[in-house]
Amino acid sequence: MPRPFSAILLALAFLTVAAAPAPAQDKSTASMQGIWRFEKDAADAPNLSFVSDGKVIFLARTGRTISIWFAWPEGPQTKGAVRVRIDTGAKRWRLDGDLITEEQNGKPAIYFMQNDMGMSERKKKWGNLAQRYNQFIESLTAANQIVITTRQGVIRLPAVTIADARQMMQL
């Protein structure tokens, strides 16, 4: 085989290997197994939650405040302020919140918590809170998969399966 031809083959082989996509950090793209629930609590506030193996993994609640809550992936960070990303396919939400720890069956459980979509009192007075929350609920209920990304891991939730969830949860 002449030299120029082998050089071209070598270059093509190199480009094929170099152009291959890097392996994803999160290899699993499957959603968690579980069910979506809609309930009203004792204060008649609507709650949309995802439950897996009898444990609440994700919760959105409206009432005196709007709360977004989910179980925090295991890892080194167990307290303090954190930033997460929730991707609904059509929209990507960045949420700033705090980690809280509660005891469950004698074991500490860590949760992410954000109230009032992270808005200051000043912004809430302008009337943006209800609009922003409704946009969040709309994107959440329209998603094929909900991906919550933290520094400690990724939580993949299936599509919301409650037919009227958007109307029941909107302000």
Image (cartoon, helix red, strand yellow):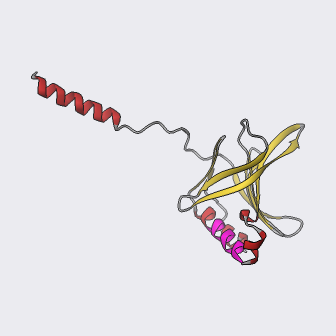
Q: In this view, does 78 lie above or below 170?
A: above
Q: Position of residue 89 (x, y in %)?
A: 54, 58
The image quadrant that residue 133 belongs to is: bottom right
Q: Which residue is drawn at 85% across and 64% down?
A: 41
Residue found at the very far bottom of the displayed protein: 126
- Left/right placement of residue 105 relative to residue 81 reads right
Judge whether residue 98 can be spotted in this image: yes
The x and y percentages for residue 6 are 16, 25
Describe residue 153's horizontal placement relative to residue 97 as left or right: left
**Residue 142 picture quarter:** bottom right
* Residue 137 part of the magenta segment: yes
Q: Along the line of sight, which residue is nearer the eye, 22 or 34?
A: 22
Work out whether residue 31 or residue 76 is closer to the camera in this orientation and state it: 76
State the extent of the magenta-drawn residues as a range. Answer: 127-138
- In the image, residue 170 above or below residue 157: below
x%, y% of residue 113? 77, 54
Splitting the image into 4 quarters, where does residue 21 fall? Answer: top left
For the N terminus, the quadrant is top left
Quarter of the image with the C terminus in it: bottom right
Looking at the image, residue 32 lies above or below residue 95? above
Q: Main secondary structure of the magenta part?
A: helix
Q: Which residue is farthest front?
A: 122
Query: At x 33% / y 32%, what residue is drawn?
Result: 17
Q: Position of residue 127 (x, y in %)?
A: 72, 78
Q: Nearer the viewer, residue 69 or 169?
A: 69
Q: Is residue 153 magenta?
A: no
